[in-house]
């Protein structure tokens, strides 16, 4: 093991123990630093020229967003070595990093596709022939409702714990990326009632709200598979992901001229730059859905929904 590999291993240990980073982030750090150490075999890892060559190789090999993440990981590693007096001079201080990251507009779900998926999910609930089928269908309906009406990440849905629910005040305490906490109001009382019913019929000791048939946490991948399956079975000829519901939620807020700072807070974005991507989109998808007497749980006025969400935050 080279010196730089040893320091990278120590840095990962510090990130795991002290920084409170998620398992996925730690995994990405390990991959990125292993790749960096491998590239630097036999090279001067403190040379500005060698580092610039590595950075250029990342830009040539990966998409801008991926390259940016990998560079940020290495830069943070060198910053750690500088703070810990492992190195005297940080070569990154002499490197100018320029990113040409194209604006990629978030993909939202077409109106008709949303209708089809929601209609199918409620049909599954209404047509359930056993207690188990009903429980599964109810779970899936609630997940789709929460994805669409709160903009929660799939990881936040999967990791949602019972102790994070306050159904008396229709409130969810969400622990998102970077261990950041935010509060989300369940503006639709009917969704809150479905949640109460689901928890009652799930007779198990799991700390998680959504569980699989073994009583374990309903995983992120299982949610993705369920959404994809429901989309296909409802006749939607598109690749639908849980994150597209989040984009649709954010776009609806932007369409209603909600202050971008509120949207940032509701989505749990650490940077307003991330939220500003939605200023490039102008749609009225959700308004059209809500105006039609099509699905019982979506007969909510968008403005009232948003007002309830913002009212909950104004009290914090």
Image (cartoon, rainbow, N blue to C red):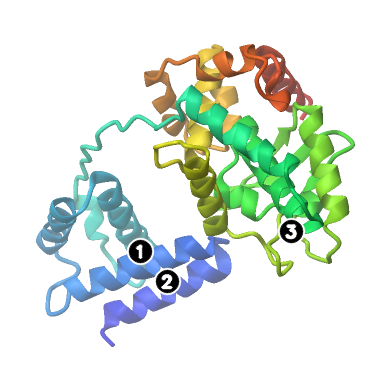
Query: Tag 2, which secondary structure?
Result: helix
Q: Looking at the image, which is closer to me, 55 or 189? A: 189
Distance from the alpha carbon under mark 3 to that under mark 2: 32 Å
Are dots 1 and 2 in contact, CB under 8 Å? yes
Image location (x, y in percent) of residue 194: 80, 39
User: Disc 2 marks which residue?
Assistant: 11
Residue for point 64% across, 30% down:
149
User: Disc 1 marks which residue?
Assistant: 77
Q: Is residue 251 visible?
A: yes
In the image, taking residue 136 as reference, residue 259 lies left or right, namely: left
In the image, which is nearer the foreground, mark 3 or mark 2? 3
User: Looking at the figure, which quarter contains the C terminus?
Assistant: top right
Q: Which quarter of the picture shows residue 125?
A: top right
Query: Tag 3, which secondary structure?
Result: loop
Image location (x, y in percent) of residue 116: 54, 31
Residue for point 61% across, 33% down:
118
Residue for point 79% across, 55% down:
130
Q: Classify mark 1: residues with Cα within 10 Å, few (<14), some (14-19) or many (20+).
A: some
Q: Which quarter of the picture shows residue 278?
A: top left
Are dots 3 and 2 in contact, CB under 8 Å? no
Distance from the alpha carbon under mark 1 to that under mark 2: 7 Å
Distance from the alpha carbon under mark 3 to that under mark 1: 35 Å
Image location (x, y in percent) of residue 293: 67, 15
User: Looking at the figure, which quarter contains the N terminus?
Assistant: bottom left
In the image, taking residue 75 as reference, residue 50 lies left or right, namely: left
User: Disc 3 marks which residue?
Assistant: 208
């Amino acid at each position: 093991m080279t010196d730089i590999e040893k320091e990278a291993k120590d840095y990962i240990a510090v990130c795991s123990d002290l920084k409170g980073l998620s398992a996925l982030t730690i995994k990405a750090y390990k991959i990125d630093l292993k790749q960096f150490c491998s590239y630097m075999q036999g090279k001067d890892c403190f040379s500005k020229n060698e580092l610039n060559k590595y950075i250029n190789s990342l830009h040539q090999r990966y998409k801008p967003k991926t390259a940016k993440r990998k560079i940020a990981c290495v830069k943070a590693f060198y910053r750690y070595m500088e703070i810990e007096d492992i190195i005297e001079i940080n070569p990154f201080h002499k490197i100018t990093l320029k990113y040409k990251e194209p604006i990629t507009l978030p993909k939202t779900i077409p109106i008709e596709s949303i209708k089809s998926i929601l209609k199918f999910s409620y049909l599954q609930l209404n047509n359930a022939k056993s207690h188990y089928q009903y429980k599964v269908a109810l779970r899936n309906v609630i997940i789709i409702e929460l994805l669409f009406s709160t903009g929660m990440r799939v990881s936040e849905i999967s990791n949602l714990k019972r102790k994070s629910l306050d159904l008396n005040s229709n409130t969810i305490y969400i622990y998102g990326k970077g261990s950041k906490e935010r509060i989300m109001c369940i503006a639709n009382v009917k969704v809150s009632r479905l949640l109460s019913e689901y928890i009652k019929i799930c007779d198990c000791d799991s700390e998680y709200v959504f569980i699989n048939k073994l009583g374990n946490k309903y995983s992120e991948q299982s949610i993705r598979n369920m959404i994809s399956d429901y989309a296909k079975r409802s006749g939607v000829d598109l690749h639908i992901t849980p994150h597209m519901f989040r984009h649709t939620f954010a776009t609806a807020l932007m369409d209603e001229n909600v202050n971008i700072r509120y949207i940032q807070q509701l989505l749990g974005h650490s940077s307003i730059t991330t939220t500003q991507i939605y200023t490039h989109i102008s749609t009225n998808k959700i308004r059209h859905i809500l105006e039609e007497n099509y699905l019982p749980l979506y007969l909510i006025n968008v403005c009232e929904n948003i007002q309830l969400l913002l009212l909950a935050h104004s009290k914090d």
